[in-house]
């Protein structure tokens, strides 16, 4: 039986089978631990068994595409995971261009359906600390409304964070999704939580992606989330993406539509500070042609 009260040093030794020589930086989760021989790893604890299961399955599914690099999973159990640590450097234009190409290749690797979880991953997963249900569907507008927008809208209204009148434009977006969605797209293999903090610019000049909420979805959702809180070298990233797989016409006008999901997650997790941006995204989506 696994002892959930282990500290990161004990976990690193148990899950890698190697001795530990020290801990780097502040304690917490994740924690940097140095193994014998000088290898530094990241030790991360999940709040529930399916948190670790979902993240491990997501990392392995993304890695299987042979496109964007992710940290290698060195060991895991129900409550902990150990991954390689990525030494970071400065975002450079060439790394950004290569990342854009690799992201396009990742999306093109595809998924069995919209909402499909990674192989071995749970249907009831998470995005950050918010529950996220992966329920496969062949129709993107219906799936996006039912499983990515409305659950968080209802949660925000039920909690009193969002007023019923404020919810109305988001509900109108959901009603009009078939006409707002743009040209049909096949299910893409998404990172699923692709904000700038989950993009590591490696010291070796290559980008790695961490902390996925991986699932089958619309590739424009990853692109919209990448821009949500700013991304270094963004136009170079997008230029690399276009070289491999140009987004459909009008995709920039649909950014608000695809931002609704992560913004509503932020409303649920962090409160009214994100309400104005959410309503602006809904207005942008309704105004798009």
Image: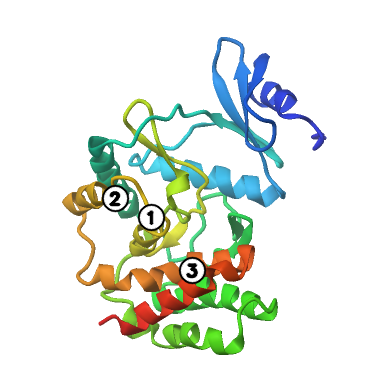
- Asked whether 176 or 260 is in front, the reply is 260
| Quarter holding residue 180 | bottom left
Residue 135 in the image, given as x and y percentages of width and height: 54, 68
Residue 154, x across and y down, in percent: 62, 79
The colour mode here is rainbow
* Residue 126 visible in the snapshot: yes
Task: Work out whether mark 2 precedes mark 3 in sequence or the reverse, and give the earlier one.
Answer: 2
Whether 52 is drawn above or below 225: the answer is above
Q: Which residue is mark 1?
A: 226
> Considering the numbered disc 3 on the image, is that residue within a helix, a strand or a loop?
helix
State whether residue 114 is above or below residue 155: above
Q: In terms of secondary structure, where does tag 2 sit?
A: helix
Mark sitting on residue 234 = 2
- Which residue is label 3 attached to? 261
Of marks 1 and 2, which one's residue comes earlier in the chain? Answer: 1
Q: Residue at x 31, y 30 (%)?
A: 205
Please report contact status of discs 1 and 2: CB closer than 8 Å, yes or no. yes
């Amino acid at each position: 039986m696994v002892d959930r009260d282990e500290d990161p040093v004990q976990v690193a030794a148990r899950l890698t089978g190697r001795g530990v020589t020290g801990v780097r930086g502040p304690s917490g989760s994740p924690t940097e631990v140095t193994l014998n021989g000088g290898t530094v790893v990241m030790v991360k604890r999940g709040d529930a068994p399916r948190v670790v299961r979902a993240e491990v399955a997501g990392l392995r599914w993304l890695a299987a595409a042979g496109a964007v690099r992710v940290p290698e999973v060195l060991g895991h159990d129900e409550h902990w995971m150990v991954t390689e640590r990525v030494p970071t450097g400065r975002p450079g234009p060439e790394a950004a261009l290569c990342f854009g190409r690799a992201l396009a290749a990742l999306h093109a690797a595809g998924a069995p359906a919209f909402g499909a979880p990674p192989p071995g991953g749970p249907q009831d997963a998470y995005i950050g600390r918010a529950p996220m249900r992966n329920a496969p569907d062949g129709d993107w507008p219906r799936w996006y409304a039912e499983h990515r927008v409305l659950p968080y809208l209802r949660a925000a209204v039920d909690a009193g964070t969002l007023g019923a009148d404020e919810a109305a434009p988001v509900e109108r977006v959901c009603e009009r999704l078939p006409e707002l969605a743009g040209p049909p797209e096949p299910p893409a293999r998404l990172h699923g939580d692709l904000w700038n903090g989950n993009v590591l610019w490696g010291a070796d000049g290559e980008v790695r992606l961490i902390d996925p909420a991986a699932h089958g979805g619309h590739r424009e959702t990853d692109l919209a989330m990448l821009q949500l809180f700013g991304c270094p070298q963004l136009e170079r990233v997008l230029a690399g993406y276009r070289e491999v797989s140009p987004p459909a016409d009008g995709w920039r006008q649909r950014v608000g539509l695809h931002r609704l999901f992560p913004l509503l997650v932020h409303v649920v997790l962090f409160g009214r500070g994100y309400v104005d941006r959410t309503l602006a995204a809904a207005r942008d989506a309704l105004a798009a042609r």
